[in-house]
Structures are given as C-alpha cells and as structure tokens.
Image (tube, rainbow, N blue to C red):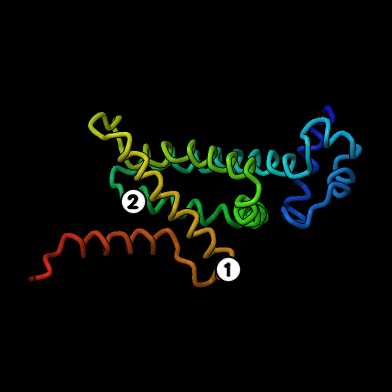
C-alpha cells in the first residue's frame, strides 16, 4: 500500500475516532505511518484528504445501501420503501461515526467549496439510484425532472432520518413507521376536504 492509500486509510480511522473537525494532520500522519509532507504532496491539504476519505467511506456505505435497494424485490412500493428505510436504520448501528463525521462536513461545506462540490457530486449520483428504486420497469414515461425530484425526496428523508437517529435514536421512526406515515399522507392527499 502506497502513501496515498495509507493516508486515506489513516484519515478514515481518524474520521471515525475523532470526527472531521477534531482531526489534525498529525493525527492522520500517526494513524497512517506517513509524514506531513505526503499530505500536501498527494492531496494538497488536510481538508482535501479528509474530504476524499469521507467521500470514499460514503461510497462504500452506498454499496451497502445499494444491496438493500436491490433486495427490495417486493412488488408493493410501500413494502419496498419500508424495507429500504429499515435497512438504513440498521446501517446506523455500524456506521454511526461516519454519519457524525458527515454531518460535521455538511456544516463545513459552506466554507470549503471543494468539500461542497464533492458532497454535491455524491448526492447527484445517489438521486438516480433512489429514483430507480421507486420507478420500476425502466419508467420510460418518467421525465428526468421527476426522477430528480423522487431521488431528492428520498434523499431528504434519508438525511432527516439520519439526523433523528443521531440526536434521538429512541424517538426516531422505524422503517415500518415511516412507511405508515407516508401511507397516511398519501391518504390525506387523496381524501376530499369537503370544501
């Protein structure tokens, strides 16, 4: 394993143990058994290295979630959504440090354009996969705008669920509760108000 890979691995360890904002360049060097100059040579800055490690960790987590999405073979959309949300909730147990570091990074993205750009790019890749989970059989009649809106809606629910799980895991909804809530919302939309 070369310096670049060792730096990424060390940065990832630091992200999980210390978080994004509390990790120093010296922490990364100690965790990767490299030197300070190699951070600048391979990444340009500590922030660029931490961002690369964070994006890499989220992409690996995304592979896990993709498996959950692919396993959602139930013909009923509500059952598939419940399955997806339950898988997401389950993944928080093993990936909590990643999400804590991610939330820290979201706050820093306002002041670090490269971080914002990389996070936005990863969201752009996530939206179509999430939309495809809802739209079965190719969805030839579904516009790109609708696909983007569906993916964005599911992404917003995932992020909101993540924050709730981090702050108040006991009160955060389960996959079943989210599916039931969505069912109630759709029912309320489809029910005439009598005006």
Q: Say left or right for 165 vs 105.
A: left
Mark 2 in CB contact with mark 1 (< 8 angstroms): no
Can residue 94 be seen in the rendering of this structure? no
Q: Residue 80 at what x, y percent from top left? A: 36, 47
Residue positioned 72% across, 40% down in the render:
48
Residue positioned 77% across, 47% down in the render:
13
Can residue 6 be seen in the rendering of this structure? yes
- Tell which of 53 and 121 is nearer to you: 121
Give the foreground label among 2 and 1.
Answer: 1
In the displayed structure, would residue 67 be above or below residue 179? above
User: Which residue in the structure is indicated by mark 1?
Assistant: 167
Classify mark 2: residues with Cα within 10 Å, few (<14), some (14-19) or many (20+): some
The quadrant where residue 74 appears? top left
Q: Residue 132 at what x, y percent from top left? A: 37, 37
- Tell which of 119 and 179 is nearer to you: 119
- Tell which of 37 and 156 is nearer to you: 37
* Extreme residue in the left direction: 194
Q: Which mark is residue 62?
A: none
In the rendered image, which quarter contains the C terminus? bottom left
Q: Residue 167 at what x, y percent from top left? A: 58, 68
Label 1 residue SS? helix
- Tell which of 155 and 45 is nearer to you: 45
Classify mark 1: residues with Cα within 10 Å, few (<14), some (14-19) or many (20+): few
Q: Residue 188 at what x, y percent from top left? A: 21, 65
User: Which residue in the structure is indicated by mark 2?
Assistant: 79
**Real-space Cα separation, disc 2 to disc 1, in angstroms:** 27 Å
The quadrant where residue 135 appears? top left
Residue positioned 35% across, 45% down in the render:
150
């Amino acid at each position: 394993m070369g310096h670049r890979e060792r730096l990424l691995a060390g940065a990832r360890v630091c992200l999980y143990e210390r978080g994004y904002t509390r990790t120093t360049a010296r922490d990364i060097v100690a965790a990767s058994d490299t030197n300070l100059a190699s951070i600048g040579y391979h990444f340009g800055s500590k922030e660029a290295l931490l961002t690369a490690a964070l994006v890499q960790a989220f992409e690996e987590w995304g592979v896990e979630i993709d498996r959950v999405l692919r396993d959602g073979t139930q013909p009923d959309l509500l059952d598939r959504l419940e399955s997806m949300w339950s898988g997401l909730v389950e993944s928080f147990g093993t990936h909590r440090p990643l999400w804590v570091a991610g939330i820290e990074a979201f706050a820093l993205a306002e002041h670090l354009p490269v971080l914002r750009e990389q996070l936005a790019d990863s969201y752009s890749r996530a939206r179509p996969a999430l939309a495809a989970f809802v739209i079965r059989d190719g969805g030839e009649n579904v516009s790109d705008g609708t696909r983007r809106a569906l993916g964005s809606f599911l992404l917003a629910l995932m992020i909101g669920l993540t924050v709730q799980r981090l702050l108040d895991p006991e009160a955060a909804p389960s996959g079943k509760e989210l599916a039931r809530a969505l069912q109630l919302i759709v029912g309320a939309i489809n029910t005439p108000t009598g005006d």
